[in-house]
Image: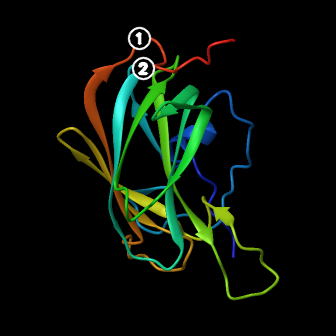
Amino acid sequence: MAMKRLTKDELRYLLPHHFSAKRVKFPQRINSLPRLPNAKIEDEITIQNGERLRLVFESVNSDWAQGVQLETGDLIVVGKIPYKRGVIIFYDPNHFETDIACYSPKGLLWVWNVWDFRPHAVAEPPGSVMSHSNYCGMIVEQIPNGFRYRCNEGRDDDDFDDLTFRVERTGKIDAQPGLTKKSSP
């Protein structure tokens, strides 16, 4: 079966982070795209440099661990822990909300869902974090203070109920990363 050759606009819609100028070029053919026409593989949020956001997990409907990957061009701070360019935050039933600060000279935050693939096959090691494959995708809904994401993991279904989360704007901006420096003795 011949794959459809995607236009640049279609690629930019589906994969904004991977299509950005700094990323390595990739082939124009991509396998296992989401089958719903309004689904995305990644989302791009315009932010202010130093903007504080809140990641809120709403629901998980999967036996695989579900998470969110967040990337900027510079730094993401979760609590007081800095992460260079990006971080994966997995759903924790005891901790539904996470406050983050995003530092991006281009003013962009990229978002996509990930899952911890634990197959029944013995050959596959546990802890294989996956994304961007097997018809995965997200339905993105704009809400008053941010975005809601309904995600489909790497199983061949189109229910988009495996993970639902929100990225909310808090209205706060940090001029400098609020990191605690270790004092020297």
Q: Alpha carbon of mark 1 to alpha carbon of mark 2: how far?
A: 6 Å
Q: Position of residue 157 (x, y in %)?
A: 47, 80
Residue position for label 1 = 175
Count residues near mark 2 (Cα–Cα under 10 Å), then give few for <14, some for 14-19, many for 20+.
Answer: many
From this viewpoint, which residue is outermost toward the left? Answer: 144
Asked if disc 1 and disc 2 are in contact, CB closer than 8 Å, the reply is yes
Using the image, determine if residue 67 lies above or below residue 25: below
Which label's residue is closer to the chain start, 1 or 2?
2
Q: Is residue 58 left or right of residue 10?
A: left
Q: Which amino acid, mark 2? A: Gly
Using the image, determine if residue 174 lies above or below residue 18: above
Closest to the observer, 10 or 90: 90
Residue located at (28% from left, 34% from top): 169
Q: Position of residue 14 (x, y in %)?
A: 51, 50
Residue position for label 2 = 50
SS under mark 2:
loop
Q: Which mark is residue 134?
A: none
Q: Which amino acid, mark 1? A: Ala
SS under mark 1:
loop
Residue located at (48% from left, 45% from top): 111
